[in-house]
Image: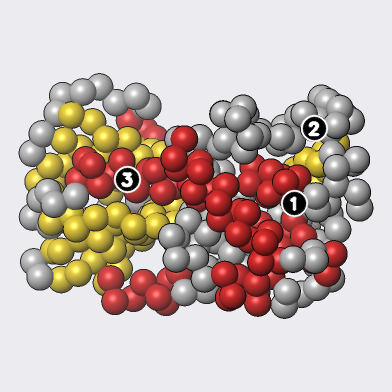
Amino acid sequence: MPEGDAVYLTARRLDRGLKGRVLTRSDFRWPSLATVDLSGATVLGTGTHGKHLLTRLDHDGTPLTLHTHLKMEGVWRVYERGQRWSRPAHEARVVLKTDGREAVGFALGLVELFPTADEAGVIGHLGPDLMDEDFDLDEGVRRLLADPDRPLGEALLDQTVVAGIGTIYLAETCFLQGLHPLAPVSAVKDPARLLKRAHHLLRNGVYYGRPSTAGDRRGTVWVYRRQRQSCLRCGTPVLAGEVGGPGRERTTYWCPSCQPR
């Protein structure tokens, strides 16, 4: 599943293609929205909160928000007129056309349309957005410490604690802080520093256009998906394990020497 930095970059891609433009046609290949026609709507821009995309429109004076989530397989692509789609048409869930360009959401996991005034009721349960330049650190720390016995990795992946972090940045943040992802939240001595690190890594991911956490090794990571390979810091083989409750298990990675439990 794309993490907060990739979702943020998707929003910027949609802004470059659609912001300020008028839709000449919309095609929702989503059952609950199949009859919706947004022709004539002006695209005001696309914002994000964690892994959620919020495309805001003005439709005949009515502010609307198109809420999409990429889940595991989804992507948004922007094409010039006549350009061939890079994925098969049967995967398209939303098509937004303007003069000369169109944006296509493929294999989206969620598509909703509602009045912009209702946004808080839809995403208000989420924790502070780690991609936000003004990330609410105090609120993030409060939510993280609310359940001190919870495994740290499970808490960080919970989007109601902080929004935007996924398995890549979970593994990398814990490694750089010397924290075992399966240890309890109570083992974190400086939770503010932990969340600042996650915020910094996600923002760096936007700057480089991809996760880039291993110092000057741009485009590489310390432990993510490196099980059985030597730790780049100490040479100990990296381990992998599951974190999360039943039905929500995710694989995470750690160095047993650099991150003792």
Q: Residues within 10 Å of mark 3 (few under 14, many from 20)?
A: some
Identify the amino acid type marked 1.
Answer: Gln
Q: Is residue 257 left or right of residue 141?
A: right
Q: Are the residues tagged 3 and 1 within 8 Å (C-beta)?
A: no
Q: Please report the residue visible at 34 percent of the width from the left and 76 percent of the height from the top.
A: 118
Q: Secondary structure at mark 2?
A: loop
Q: Is residue 229 left or right of residue 120?
A: right
Q: Nearer the viewer, mark 3 or mark 2?
A: 2
Q: Secondary structure at mark 3?
A: helix
Identify the amino acid type marked 3.
Answer: Arg
- Please state the horizontal and vertical placement of residue 174, each as a whole percent of the image: 74, 50
Front residue of this view, candidates 134 and 28: 134
Tell me the number on the disc at residue 260: none
Mark closest to the chain's N terminus, 2 or 1? 1
Residue carrying label 2 = 233
The image shows a total of numbered marks equal to 3
Identify the amino acid type marked 2.
Answer: Arg
- Please state the horizontal and vertical placement of residue 103, each as a whole percent of the image: 25, 40
Place residue 137 in its image quadrant: bottom right
Q: Secondary structure at mark 1?
A: helix
Q: Is residue 95 above or below residue 164?
A: above
Q: Residues within 10 Å of mark 2 (few under 14, many from 20)?
A: few
Residue carrying label 3 = 12
Mark closest to the chain's N terminus, 3 or 2? 3
Residue carrying label 1 = 177
- Please state the horizontal and vertical placement of residue 126, each as a whole percent of the image: 53, 69
